[in-house]
Amino acid sequence: MTRTDAWRRCWSRAGASAAALGLLVGSSPAHGQSMADRVAATADGQIRMSYAARPGVCGNGRNVSTSRHTDDWEGWCEDGPVRVVLEVVDGQVTDVDTYVGGRWRAPRMETIDLGVVSAVAAAEYLLSLARQSNGRAGKEAVFPATLADSAVVWPELLVIAKDQSRPRQTRKAAVFWVAQAAGDAATAGLEGIVDDDTGDRELRKSAVFALSQIKDSGVPSLIRIARTHRDPVIRKQAMFWLGQSEDPRAIALFEELLLVKR
């Protein structure tokens, strides 16, 4: 995790620290504060939060699995919680680090721990960060949002993926995780990204890859793209991922195309 000189600065005013701590740690629903309000109260430093992970998510720190295996043996993998660190410089979140399981180390700089927060509220805040940040933090906020228990994130991920004002890396992260989060329900949205001729080609290629990650319903979409898409690069990308699928429908397409060439 990159550190800048700003992180080595301690808060110089004890009064400001006490006020921020009161807002961030001691606030209650009666204060009417959103998580964004809490984060905005920090000038420089770290903010930590923990929240429940959705079923199937486990980890041993930085190594995170989003689907538990059912083999006879499994390495140490805790069910949660999700632990997120926000790094703030001059009141702006500049980086987001995500862990699952484990425990916090003693902080090395001025740190505010929000404790256990609502998973849904955490996801909403992280998605808002992805929508608004033009830097690294926007991209890094997508992944922890997808880990939150009881949070339906894929509709908002599609909005971010289609928003051409967002940085490419943030949009690519949204495209990748929307496939993991929504499965079959995301297929139409991903196809819309692929078919948008005005869109970024690299983003469209990412959407093709995301379709390849959707079991069953992704294959017909890839076949359609391989047959009819106007961009030969995108058609080739679809053919490549169909070749990785080992799906009988993909093999039938290859056979058909080869017979036509004879």
Image: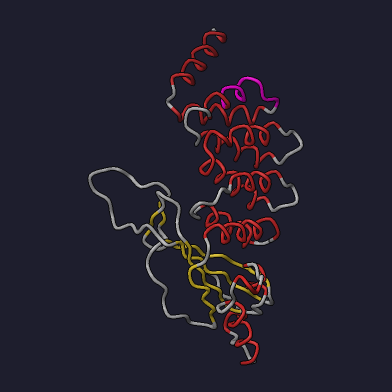
At x 59%, y 76%, the residue is: 27
Give the residue drawn at x 52%, y 16%.
253
Horizontal side of 191 relative to 240 (left or right) equals right
Could you tell me how many numbered marks the image carries? 0
Query: Viewed as shown, does residue 72 lie left or right of 197?
Result: left
Residue 75 image position (x, y, % from top left):
28, 54
Q: Is residue 47 above or below residue 151?
A: below
Up the image or down, 93 lies above or below 208; here it is: below
Q: Is residue 64 magenta?
A: no
Give the residues drawn in magenta, as a range: 222-230
Relative to 171, does residue 109 appear above or below in the rendering? below
Q: Nearer the viewer, residue 238 or 131?
A: 131
Q: Looking at the image, which residue is at 58% across and 59% down?
A: 141
Q: Position of residue 219 (x, y in %)?
A: 52, 26
Give x and y (percent) for residue 198: 76, 37
Q: Where residue 18 sits in the image (x, y, percent)?
A: 60, 88
Q: Main secondary structure of the magenta part?
A: helix
Q: Quadrant of the C terminus?
A: top right
Residue 210 lies in what quarter of the image? top right
* Residue at 60%, 48% in the rendered image: 174
